[in-house]
Amino acid sequence: MASRSYLTYGKAELQDKLDRNPYSYLHVINPAGTKTAEAKRGSEGFFALVRSRFEEFVADGLFQRLEGNHLAIYRQTTPTSSCTGIVGALAVETIRSGGLKMHEQTLQKRERLFAKYLNKVGCHAEPILCMYPDENERGHAIQQHIHAWINDHKPEMDFSTTDRIRHSIWIVGEQASLEISDAMDKIPSLYLADGHHRVASSIMLSEKFPDDAAKQTVLTFAVPESELVIRGYHRELIGIPWSTEEWDAAFHRMADIDHVERVEHHSGPPSNVGIIHVHHANANWVLHLKEPTDQLVRNEVDAAQLQRTLFEPELKIQDPRNDKRLGYIPGTLNSTDLRDRAMKHSNRVVFELHPVPTQQIKKTADLGGYLPPKSTWVEPKLRSGLFIHDIQ
């Protein structure tokens, strides 16, 4: 039933999923399938169709409503990692009072659109992803609660999807849920890893309906910091027909550059923060950034330094969110994939970045700052429709 984000499906794959699986949550979020819907996607009319389809699934008994006050434990296991955390409802008031720290700016246009969606569709079908420090006594206490329940109970759901990811879910008893909730309350702040626009739109909706208790919470998946997987989010310049000599000169003009070296090939990803691998059809470089002397920019991530010292002065890319010459590549691609991508196009250059450490994310959030758009590729990626928080 649970699905990947519909944005990850091509048209043919989406149609195949809809044709083969009548129970997929894709039928809810794509009420007309791949055909043209009665209302334009993104309109309130379209959102009403989604809600109607959701209610059909409820009426057919495809969703199982959980009565009482329960948390869930969810574990996602991939071939390379495992992450186990708590699924529950986070109070908007907790967010307002600083109990959730964020590191990404949101767009008001998207906030308003998401708020309309939530109001009309009436449910959260994918939790926001948060992390909590687990190296201290408070974090250890939460881990002990989780492991105690898992060790004494079999999961209610335990299945694998075709992308070789295993999903295990335990529904926690009400008393144990209270104990875990109390332990979570002792954490000074959670840090938002993914879902900034969902948080902003939920806050907006709660303010519009202050007396509606159901709209005062946000579906949340909280995971220990040590189990969160952060990958690099790479940059790709498109349509820049520079020669290798022109790129050489531009790299040497970069502010805050320590040194540049041209290499025959990259043996792997960047070994540390401050090192950027550059892939081009005719050459490869390693950029070694130095720590800026200006206190105001000392905490910059590599993506911000790249934007400030190369993309903006050399290529006049002023708006990294919307400039069509700048693309973003998720960290699921490895160095060989990135190299192959660059080899196919002589007018493209790929900048492979090291992942942003969680300590840097937390420091940015603590200071009230923001990372550049698409700075981190964070896992686990949760499926839509696996957990649903009905707020209607």
Image (cartoon, rainbow, N blue to C red):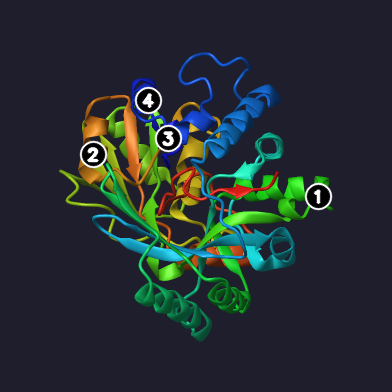
Q: CA distance from mark 4 to mark 3?
A: 16 Å
Reply above or below: 372 against 4: below
Cβ atoms at labels 2 and 3 below 8 Å apart: no
Mark 4: few/some/many CA within 10 Å (<14, 14-19, 20+): few
Residue denoted by label 3: 24
Q: Secondary structure at mark 1?
A: helix
To which quarter of the image does residue 289 belong? bottom left
Amino acid marked by disc 4: Gly
To which quarter of the image does residue 161 belong? top left
Cβ atoms at labels 2 and 1 below 8 Å apart: no
Amino acid marked by disc 3: Ser
Residue denoted by label 4: 10
Camera-side mark, 2 or 1: 1
The numbered mark at residue 207 is: 1
Camera-side mark, 3 or 1: 3
Mark 1: few/some/many CA within 10 Å (<14, 14-19, 20+): some
Q: Secondary structure at mark 2?
A: helix
Q: CA distance from mark 3 to mark 1?
A: 33 Å
The numbered mark at residue 337 is: 2
- The answer to whether residue 214 is left or right of residue 35 is right
Q: Earlier in the sequence, mark 2 or mark 3?
A: 3
Reply above or below: 318 against 147: above
Residue at image coords 59%, 51%: 104
Mark 3: few/some/many CA within 10 Å (<14, 14-19, 20+): some
Q: CA distance from mark 2 to mark 3?
A: 31 Å
Amino acid marked by disc 2: Asp
Q: Is residue 283 visible in the rendered structure shown here?
A: no
